[in-house]
Amino acid sequence: MLENPPELTAEHWDRYSRQIGPGVLSREGQRRLANATALITRVGGMGGPAALMLTMAGVGRIVIAHGGELISPDLNRQVLGSEAGLHQLRAPAFADRLRAMNRFVDVEAIAHEPNDDEACRLAERCDIFLSCPPTFDERLRLNRAAVRAGVPLIDAAQWGMSGTLAVYQPGRTACLQCVYPEPPPFEEAFPVVGAISSAIGSLAALEAIKILSDTGKPLWGKMFTYDAYHGYVGTVELARRDDCPCCGSTVETR
């Protein structure tokens, strides 16, 4: 949580009025969002919509991490980018786009993917991780940092017209390495339709909003699967492995 959380003014309450009420957020839930910090890495096809939805919902601080420059093939799915931003560093430009959406949210940009040490430092000052990178090496790195710090992790993945979303609570549910003991093969230029990216990224943000605001029932220890090509939706319970090298021992959560 933020050290000096913002005092919500009449302008804040007016801005968020459509998401407060029965079946959505309470006023206390909105205060919790304003006092929270979320890390999203990366902020491309899934992480971009996730960061956008968290910004619009009023999470107090958004930290985004994404290296490299925007290229033309990104624009079928990376909603924070634009033709005007081609060949510019993604993270600073994407951060400006988020700031333009909500003046009440503090946006921090990291123009590279965090290494192990940096991920651990980020976990100490963030309340949740949204893991949206293309490689499992990066995903497992974020998972290790989240488990060590006791930070909830939401992992979003995509391929073609399919996507998955898993929600992990360190010390209480399986972790990502329980499900993927070894990184699966990586396809550099995998095919993907932007609509599935946005759908899974938005659902990842919704789970984060539920967790941070203490609203509803998060998908703790479950994986949501969506095969849009065949019209299939499902949910799978994820089993924790006692011999998991990441979370198999007792984990102290904060």
Image: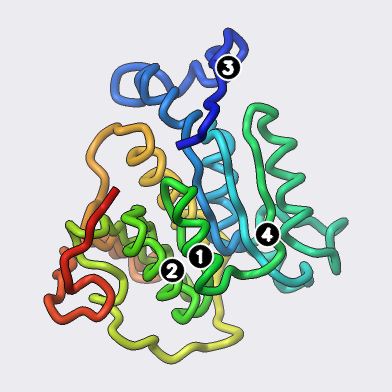
* Residues at discs 1 and 2 in contact (Cβ within 8 Å): no
Q: Which element type, helix, strand or loop, lies under badge 4?
A: strand
Please tell me the numbered disc located at residue 119. 1
Q: Residues within 10 Å of mark 2 (few under 14, many from 20)?
A: many
Instruction: Give the mark nearest the N terminus, 1 or 2.
Output: 1
Residue 173 left/right relative to 66? left
Which residue: 58% across, 87% down? 188
Q: Which element type, helix, strand or loop, lies under badge 1?
A: helix
Residue 219 left/right relative to 30? left
Instruction: Give the mark nearest the N terminus, 1 or 3.
Output: 3
Q: Residues within 10 Å of mark 4 (few under 14, many from 20)?
A: some
Q: Which circle, 3 or 4, is nearer the viewer?
A: 4
Q: Which circle, 1 or 2, is nearer the viewer?
A: 1
Q: Residues within 10 Å of mark 3 (few under 14, many from 20)?
A: some
89, 86: nearer the viewer:
89
Where is mark 3, residue-wise?
12
Instruction: Give the mark nearest the N terminus, 1 or 4.
Output: 4
Instruction: Give the mark nearest the N terminus, 3 or 4.
Output: 3
Which residue: 48% across, 31% down? 35
- Distance, label 1 to label 4, CA atoms, is 11 Å
Disc 4 residue type?
Answer: Ile
Instruction: Give the mark nearest the N terminus, 2 or 4.
Output: 4
Q: Residues within 10 Å of mark 1 (few under 14, many from 20)?
A: many
Disc 3 residue type?
Answer: His
Where is mark 4, residue-wise?
110
Residue 3 left/right relative to 252? right
